[in-house]
Amino acid sequence: MGLRSKDILALQEMTWEDMQLILDTADSLREIISRPIKKVPTLRGKTIVTFFHEPSTRTRTSFEIAAKYMSADTASITASTSALTKGETLKDTAYSLEAMGVDCLIMRHGVSGSCHFLARHVNGSVINAGDGTHEHPTQGLLDMMTIRRHKGRLAGLKVAIVGDVLHSRVARSNIWGLTQAGAEVVLAGPATLLPEQMPGLTVPAYTSIEDALRDADVVYVLRLQRERQAKGLLPSLAEYARNYSINRVRLALAKPDALLMHPGPMNRGVEISSEVADGERSLIVEQVTNGVAVRMAILYLLLGGAA
Amino acid sequence: MSLVIKGGKLVDPEAGTIRAGDVICRDGRIAAAGPGAAAGAPADAEVFEAAGLFVTPGLIDMHVHLREPGFEYKEDVASGSRAAVVGGFTTIACMPNTAPVIDQTALVLSVLEMAERAGLANVLPIGSISKGLAGVELAELGGMFQAGAVGFSDDGKPVMNSELMRTALQYAKMYNVPLITHSEDMHLAADGQMHFGAWSALLGLRGIPAVAEAGMIARDCMLAELTGGRVHVAHVSTELSLSILRWAKSRGIAVTSEVTPHHLTLTDEEVSRTSYHTNTKMNPPLRSDADVRAMKEGLRDGLIEVIASDHAPHSLDDKDVEYNFAANGIIGLETSLPVLLTKLVATGDVDLLTVVRALTLGPAKVLGLVRKGRLAEGMDADLTLIDSETSWTIDPRRFESKSRNTPFAGWEVQGRAAATVVGGRVVQRDGRICV
């Protein structure tokens, strides 16, 4: 029993059965993280490369730690220190890495679809660690895992995703994953940061954050990228914060036991106030732990079979 | 030397008829065309048995990029000419966005010389509207017209400066040639990778809304009205644009338009279906299903006069990269006819006469080619013989074009240009160039 695809590119393309398999596996692998000796031999002899064209703290470290806990060998490349700066193409870089015997490439890239492009050119597995404004599937899965651990289920829950949905790859992965799991997803943000309705989906989008938050089981706050204001999509960060920042008053509109989540990195005082970010409803730190578990599960399911 | 095309099905886009007949070509012109015309042929004439084949005026593709000078690794006038005649095209008009840009008399002459050397298709240069395509100063329109330019265009870029567009229309009016517009609002389309809609939302690619095209078409039509000049809208792609064109025509504005085979057959869903394959990337982008249906309707009801491929060759290095970094455009010369026959004619969406008219008489009228586009005595002896039966698979490795960037690779199609006659000479037969 394994995954249907050699790659993890988008939750929009993944079946609910595969997602469940990843979530169940992650739940059982999670305890390794709290062991005194965090090492299992499952992926001994496997080589994993992280290849990040954009800055990252959490995601890259999380993948590397997940791989190391499973005894895989890892190497990491960042675009700024690679031959890409000498004009090498992504395709040639991919061919070189594959020629070294890499089993799995984990890539973050600023252009949507780049991981699909990479997957077309290599035989090994490709994991999308965030492609442009498209998807960030492992983030979506770790968020689903986090919700499921606290609510015991995903089906029937109301999840409000608020902020810059238009440019958010985290939002897209969560939308596809959560709707497939049977959750009700609603979106909220200023009109200039909400996307068109996607094919096959009817996800309500509100410009009034109050409408979206009412009776929500989960409030998922997206990072507001500061360059959105420079691009003219927002009059000012202050105006955004006034109308859309999640604070104690707004959080109170959700269900009393609502969970608060954020993929990080946070802009405190812009999209989220510190009092709720650090408050008792916040799962922001736990999301990071679950991220390691989900990535261990994915690496195991993609690479663990043949050893 | 004479050539007799004997026993074909003559497609006359002007009369709107298809009937059995022959065509006699003599000294580069059509000497006779019609039922039984072969009886009057000289005894020494070369005979081409055309039983079962449609015989049409030579197909014209008024929108191709031949890339020479400057980008010969993508295409050159010779390879583009070979691709044209293999695809059934006897006449092609080439866009000026080369390096250097075709923006002065001497450069028009040099393209004509390259075409002469290639010696296959008629190659008609289109000069640029603005010097260097910079959109600032008017190019040497008069000189280029006198050297043989058949129209002017900054294709690839819109003329954003409305005053420059107005001036160009006034100036081009003196020569009664069209300004071929790449109608696109650069601000609305900035960084756009595909059509704006549900699929761009799913794929996380920045979308180009229909209004980016339609808005500029509206401006160009109104400027044509103001100046009395003539506008031909290149690669129209949205339903919204067509309603603007319908409105402009109802006011009597001198505007014509063209649509590409890909905007008649593919939708924006293709970007998702192919997992971001960059052969789905072109400008204007593949549009919605409703837009594609509107394009066919516009062709059927005569609102759109021309089908043109926007043949845009790019090397693998230009295309096989991340989606945002890939060059816009696909090639079309060797796929237009089979794709149209298969997806429009064979399906019953658009009849053969309408398709042939949009590939012959339509562009001939737009470009003022008085001796082309019709099957009649005195016309240039340019003919395309179409086999509408043979099924085959599009294989880019067999293309005459230097480039391979087509979304139609692997398509099972029905029909092809069985032979191409340019100036009374059979230059292509059964897919092989025979000169």
Image (spheres, rainbow, N blue to C red):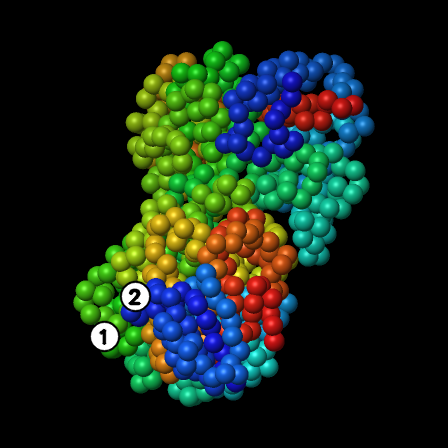
Residue at the spot 57% in from the left edge and 79% down from the top edge? B119
Q: Residue furthest top?
A: A152
Q: Are the numbered discs 1 and 2 placed on the same chain, yes or no?
A: yes
Label 2 Cα crowd, 10 Å radius (few <14 / some 14-19 / many 20+): few
Which chain's residue wears label 1? Answer: B
**Within the image, what quadrant is residue A103 found in?**
top right
Q: Which residue is mark 1?
A: B226
- Quadrant for the C terminus of chain B in the image: bottom right
> N-terminal of the two: label 1 or label 2?
2
Q: Which mark is residue B150?
A: none
Q: Check disc 2 and give the amino acid type.
A: Gly
**Vertical comparison of B363 with A92: above or below:** below
Identify the residue at horizontal 54%, vertical 58% (top origin): B327
| Residue neighbourhood size for the residue with mark 1, other residues' Cα within 10 Å, grouped as few (<14), some (14–19), many (≥20) | few
Place of residue B271 in the rendered image (x, y in percent of width and height, measured from the top left): 49, 45
Q: Is residue B162 above or below residue A210?
A: below
Please tell me whether residue A301 is drawn above or below residue B280 in the rendered image: above
- Is label 1 in contact with label 2 (beta carbons under 8 Å)? no
